[in-house]
Image (cartoon, helix red, strand yellow):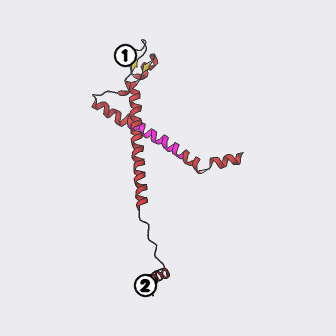
Amino acid sequence: MLEEFKKFALRGNVVDLAVGVIIGAAFGAIVTSAVQDLFMPAIGAITGGLDFSNYYLPLSSKVQTGLAYTEAKKQGAVLGYGQFLTVLLNFVIVAFVLFMVIRAMNRLQHAEDKKPEAVAEVPADVKLLGEIRDILATKPKV
């Protein structure tokens, strides 16, 4: 059983999947940082200094208005639509970047497919036989 597990775990597909998951997690962290640290502050500046992460609707009378989202969650039920907007923007950015990467890969693949193959040099004996055939084809039949 140990040998069978070793064969399974070291198969190329499993290793490729593990690498993909690790790279995906790292990429997710980069995109999350880009959204939270670059895009959302810029959007906030454009909209007059609004911080989307603190937008919420209190669903409980215990929640005081004007609190930060994390503090409001501690007091009671809140609908955090600002957090949802941030995550939605994060998803759109990830989807767009993946679209661009796959599009570039497809273009490279098509460019590779369109490359003309190098024409192999015809051997001398085959060339000579072709010339003989052509000469015989032009001779009148008797």
Quadrant of the frame with the C terminus: bottom left
Q: Position of residue 60 (x, y in %)?
A: 43, 14
Q: Label 1: few (<14), some or many (≥20) within 10 Å?
A: few
Q: Position of residue 14 (x, y in %)?
A: 58, 47
The extreme front residue here reads: 142
* Range drawn in magenta: 19-34
Q: Is residue 77 left or right of residue 1?
A: left
Image point 39% across, 31% down: which residue? 86
Residue that label 2 marks: 135
Instruction: Specify the quadrant of the image occupied by residue 52.
Output: top left
Query: Tag 2: residue type?
Result: Ile
Q: Nearer the viewer, residue 131 or 75?
A: 131
Q: Nearer the viewer, residue 17 or 26?
A: 17
- Up/down of 36 relative to 134, above or below: above
- Up/down of 105 relative to 67, above or below: below
Instruction: Specify the quadrant of the image occupied by residue 113.
Output: bottom left
Mark 2 near mark 1, Cβ–Cβ under 8 Å?
Answer: no
Q: Position of residue 31 (x, y in %)?
A: 42, 39
Query: Tag 1: residue type?
Result: Thr
| Residue 127 covered by magenta stretch | no
Instruction: Specify the quadrant of the image occupied by residue 141.
Output: bottom left
Q: Is residue 66 left or right of residue 11?
A: left
Q: Label 2: few (<14), some or many (≥20) within 10 Å?
A: few
Q: Position of residue 127 (x, y in %)?
A: 46, 80
The extreme right residue here reads: 1
Quadrant of the frame with the N terminus: top right
Label 1: element kind: loop
- Up/down of 141 relative to 69, above or below: below
Specify the label residue 65 is tagged with.
Answer: 1
